[in-house]
Image (tube, rainbow, N blue to C red):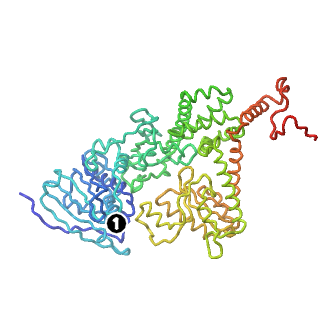
């Protein structure tokens, strides 16, 4: 007998804004929300999931629809009422720990609300046995006053299964009235879904994104451990894991960087995760290339709340839990080991690459043995610092020329000092190459001009010039820094000045602002050498630092940090403070903050450019170049072998002098 169409009012019990908090607030990231809906498909026994994402060219928040369809068991209207619309239902504790032999991923009963992180309306259609049930969940109608509980009626329709529904049974969730103004990045979502579900899960349940199956990304590895497949490790008795890790040839997309920790087939610690090693010197560069998967099912074996070590949105493991601590220690040691091995490998690789280049090999062969060894050492350190691609040849050439043009003996000694830190060495050689210190007199004029600007900078500091222009004074610190941003720090790239925080967040695509009326505005934004954001606040030289100043800077960084990682807060003012000694001490000890005085900034800038002017004034095109080269060679002999000329050099007379008045000039006359 054919099923008849009938209406039914379903009922959901809502306490205040509970649904809004669980859906909208918990699942703000679109990839996280979609992954949660896919996990529900697994728990329904699905073998196939189809996700339809609006294309960018036709995307409209008001008309586009995002759909997730599975071929799972579907639900009857009674099951919708008693199970689906019960928020917080723990299927495991209810005796449903497995479905068709699969371990259930969900246990908190809130993943069904993930769609509210994407849209304001969810249309749920579920069917089996020739009968389909459709109901609409509207975020507005489910939102109640915060101080009382309310039963909300949800109109539904039960009807014969439509031919448009693709499987014998299943569930489809259509998300409408989308919240984000920008379309979903399909390539990024594909990568994210591949990382959020294990290969085993994706083998048993195929996931399709706009008709294309989600598969592991094709990564060209520089090194991988193990070479293929997974490695099995027992962290402690009863705590066994499977894992693999590797470094790609090129910088990885953000979704592929770092480890993902998978528990029972689904992400429990979202990538990019590096076991807190990314802040170390070895991790600052290599983590952009590192990717890996750790499967640790033992972290989620129970059904009670006490055995739950994974956050509700499946983004983070409770690493303080006694069961998680050994894995954290193991992962930390593994990550450090992998990064060290990669550093050593890349150093040897770059040295070999330069050494097998015929042009470079011939030049190295002409050097004395000691210099050749130093060149090899510096090349290896450049490799360890991450130098690669188009930067290898010019930087290798710069190092070789420093040894070939011996008047740069002092700079070579300074390179030797920097050799203890590969990144510092790379930076020094980068400066040598980029500013053409070895061959361009024009650069010397630039440096001299910068020193003149530094003098002007000092003049403004002494005169306590205002922060910005006013009716009393056109000259101001802000305009000088805007013209010459290197004054603050030659290693920072200043890219934005005096802008409202909310405007910058919108520039970065963050339309879902918590407080769009916030009027705070920073003075400058910069990028540091490791690519992290620097928020800069300046005050005139006579200004005394207040607690309010520091609070504002922290607030700027916190709000900007919602969209971009803020590595440093820099406050520049006088050396006067109207804050407690304890607060000042705590700020000075923070790694993410710096209190600079204008005098300190000026002194550092002058020292920096005076150093390079001294180097540049050794002009390699000078007619007396060969004489200076012989002088430096002799200096090496004296420093390495002692102050003894020998018969031949004594016969040649005194060495080169800075001023030549002519051989026949008698200084007595």
Where residue 310 appears, as percent x and y from the top left, is 41, 53
Residue drawn 67% across the image and 55% down it:
449
Residue 525's image quarter? bottom right
Furthest residue in direction left, as rendered: 1
Where, quadrant-wise, is the C terminus in this rendering? top right
Q: Secondary structure at mark 1?
A: helix
Q: Which quarter of the image is occupied by the N terminus?
A: bottom left
Closer to us: 620 or 270: 620
Q: Residue furthest right?
A: 668
Quarter of the image for residue 32 reads bottom left
Side (left or right) of 180 relative to 449: left
Asked if residue 497 lies left or right of residue 417, the reply is left
Image label count: 1
Picture layout, residue 480 above or below residue 250: below
Q: Can you identify the residue that label 1 sits on?
A: 19
Could you tell me residue 661's position as x and y percent?
84, 40
Instruction: Depth check: give the residue in front, 547 or 601.
Output: 601
Q: Quadrant of residue 364?
A: top right
């Amino acid at each position: 007998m054919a099923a008849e169409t009938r209406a039914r009012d379903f009922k959901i019990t809502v306490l205040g804004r509970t649904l809004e908090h669980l859906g909208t607030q918990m699942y703000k990231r679109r990839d996280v929300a979609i992954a949660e809906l896919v996990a529900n498909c697994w728990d329904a026994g699905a073998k196939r999931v189809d996700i339809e994402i609006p294309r960018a060219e036709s995307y409209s928040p008001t008309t586009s629809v995002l759909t997730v369809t599975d071929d799972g068991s579907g639900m009857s209207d009674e099951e919708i009422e008693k199970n689906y619309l019960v928020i917080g239902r723990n299927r495991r504790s209810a005796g449903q720990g497995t479905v068709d032999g699969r371990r259930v991923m969900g246990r908190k009963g809130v993943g069904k609300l993930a769609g509210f992180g994407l849209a304001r309306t969810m249309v749920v259609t579920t069917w089996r046995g020739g009968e389909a049930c459709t109901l609409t969940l509207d975020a507005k109608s489910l939102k109640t006053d915060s101080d009382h509980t309310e039963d909300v009626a949800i109109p539904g329709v039960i009807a014969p299964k439509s031919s448009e529904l693709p499987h014998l049974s299943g569930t489809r969730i259509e998300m409408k009235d989308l919240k984000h103004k920008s379309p979903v990045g399909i390539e990024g979502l594909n990568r994210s879904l591949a990382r959020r579900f294990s290969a085993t899960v994706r083998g048993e349940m195929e996931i399709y994104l706009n008709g294309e199956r989600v598969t592991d990304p094709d990564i060209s590895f520089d090194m991988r451990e193990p070479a293929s497949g997974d490695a099995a490790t027992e962290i402690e008795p009863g705590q066994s894991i499977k894992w693999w890790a590797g470094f790609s040839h090129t910088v990885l997309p953000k979704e592929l960087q770092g480890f993902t920790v998978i528990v029972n087939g689904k992400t429990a610690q979202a990538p990019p995760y590096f076991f807190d090693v990314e802040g170390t010197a070895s991790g600052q560069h290599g983590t952009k290339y590192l990717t890996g998967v750790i499967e640790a099912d033992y972290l989620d074996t129970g059904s009670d709340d006490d055995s739950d070590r994974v956050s509700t949105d499946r983004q983070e493991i409770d690493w303080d839990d006694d069961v998680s601590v050994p894995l954290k220690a193991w992962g930390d040691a593994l990550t450090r080991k992998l990064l060290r091995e990669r550093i050593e490998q890349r150093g040897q690789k770059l040295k070999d690459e330069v050494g097998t280049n015929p042009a470079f090999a011939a030049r190295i062969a002409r050097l004395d043995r000691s210099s050749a060894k130093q060149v090899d050492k510096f090349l290896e350190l450049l490799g360890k610092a991450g130098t690669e691609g188009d930067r290898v040849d010019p930087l290798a050439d710069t190092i070789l020329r420093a040894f070939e043009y011996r008047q740069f003996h002092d700079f070579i000694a300074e390179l030797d000092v920097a050799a203890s830190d590969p990144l510092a060495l790379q930076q020094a050689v980068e400066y040598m190459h980029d500013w053409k210190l070895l061959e361009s007199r024009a650069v010397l004029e630039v440096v001299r001009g910068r020193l003149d600007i530094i003098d002007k900078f000092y003049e403004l500091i002494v005169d306590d010039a205002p922060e910005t222009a006013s009716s009393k004074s056109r000259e101001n610190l802000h305009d000088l820094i805007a013209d010459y941003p290197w004054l603050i720090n030659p290693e920072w790239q200043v890219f934005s000045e005096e802008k409202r925080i909310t405007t910058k967040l919108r520039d970065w695509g963050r339309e879902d602002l918590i407080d769009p009326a916030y009027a705070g505005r920073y003075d400058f934004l910069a990028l540091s050498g490791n690519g992290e954001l620097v928020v800069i606040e300046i005050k005139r030289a006579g200004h005394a630092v207040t607690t309010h100043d520091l609070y504002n800077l922290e607030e700027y960084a916190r709000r900007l940090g919602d969209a971009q990682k803020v590595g440093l807060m820099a406050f520049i003012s006088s050396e006067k403070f109207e804050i407690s000694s304890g607060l000042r001490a705590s700020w000075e000890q923070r790694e993410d903050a710096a209190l600079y005085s204008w005098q300190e900034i000026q002194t550092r800038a002058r020292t920096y450019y005076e150093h390079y002017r001294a180097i540049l004034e050794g002009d390699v095109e000078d007619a007396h170049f060969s004489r200076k080269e012989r002088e430096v060679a002799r200096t090496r002999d004296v420093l390495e072998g002692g102050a003894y000329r020998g018969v031949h050099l004594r016969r040649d007379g005194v060495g080169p002098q800075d001023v030549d008045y002519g051989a026949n000039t008698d200084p007595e006359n």
